[in-house]
Amino acid sequence: MALKIVENFVFDKTNFSENGLPKGEYENCIFRNCDFSNGDLSNVTFIDCRFEQCNLSMAKMKNTSLKGVKFFSSKLLGLNFSDCNIFLLSLTFENCLMNLTSFYKLKLKGTPFNDCDLQESDFTDSDLSLGSFDNCNFERAIFEGTNLEKADFRTSFHYSIDPTVNRIKKAKFSQNGLAGLLDKYDIVIE
């Protein structure tokens, strides 16, 4: 059976949470105000697609291909990006709610995260080097064995990053955020 190929199509206000998105390849498509929550996106390929104001919370993404995919103002709660196909994985996030999201062991070099809420997200053993994190909330996010070299955290907040177990060479932090690098020492900074 041939997989469905969809190009240059706009999906608007469509609910894919129960019946799911048909398996196939979606290229240059826009998904606007769509609901994928608790749905199954496994083995689907997205190339140069945009998700705008969509809900993908808790969707299954086993072997999902995300190549040049952009998420705008979307709800991505509890997504496990670690389950995705890593070949040509390329993502952009802007104004997204991404609490409890996992990026475990992913190579996301240069990935932009702008105005995102990433509370309790897991970045263990991932490569976020050269990434930009503009105005992101990292409260209780996990950074362990993470490559953050040359990443920009100057406008982000609530992070706790241990420099002894993460690579932070040439990463950028604001003076206000330096306390997040010293949390493990339980010192008072005034």
Image (cartoon, rainbow, N blue to C red):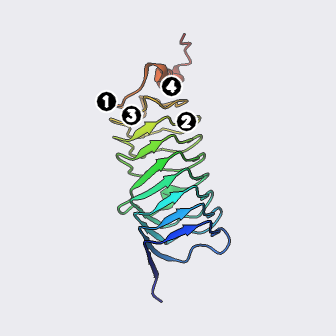
**Which amino acid type is marked by label 2?**
Asn
Residue at screen point 59% across, 69% down:
40
10 Å neighbourhood of mark 1: few (<14), some, or many (≥20)? few
Measured as percent of width and height from the top left, residue 58 is found at 63, 58
State if disc 3 and disc 1 touch (CB < 8 Å).
no
Q: Which residue is mark 2?
A: 137
| Residue nearest the viewer, comparing 111 with 83 | 111
If the image is split into quadrants, where does the C terminus sit?
Answer: top right
According to the picture, the residue beneath numbered tag 4 turns out to be: 180
Element class at badge 4: helix
Which-is-in-front pick, marks 4 and 3? 3
Query: Spatial distance from mark 2 to mark 3, Cα to Cα?
Result: 13 Å
State how many labels appear. 4
Residue where numbered disc 1 is placed: 170
- Marked residue nearer the N-terminal end (2 or 1): 2
Front in this rendered view, residue 114 or 86:
114
Task: Give the CA separation, mark 4 to mark 3.
Answer: 14 Å
- Reply above or below: 73 against 139: below
Residue 168 vs 185, above or below: the answer is below
Q: Residue at x 36, y 63 (%)?
A: 87
Relative to 8, is 111 above or below? above
SS of the residue under disc 1? loop
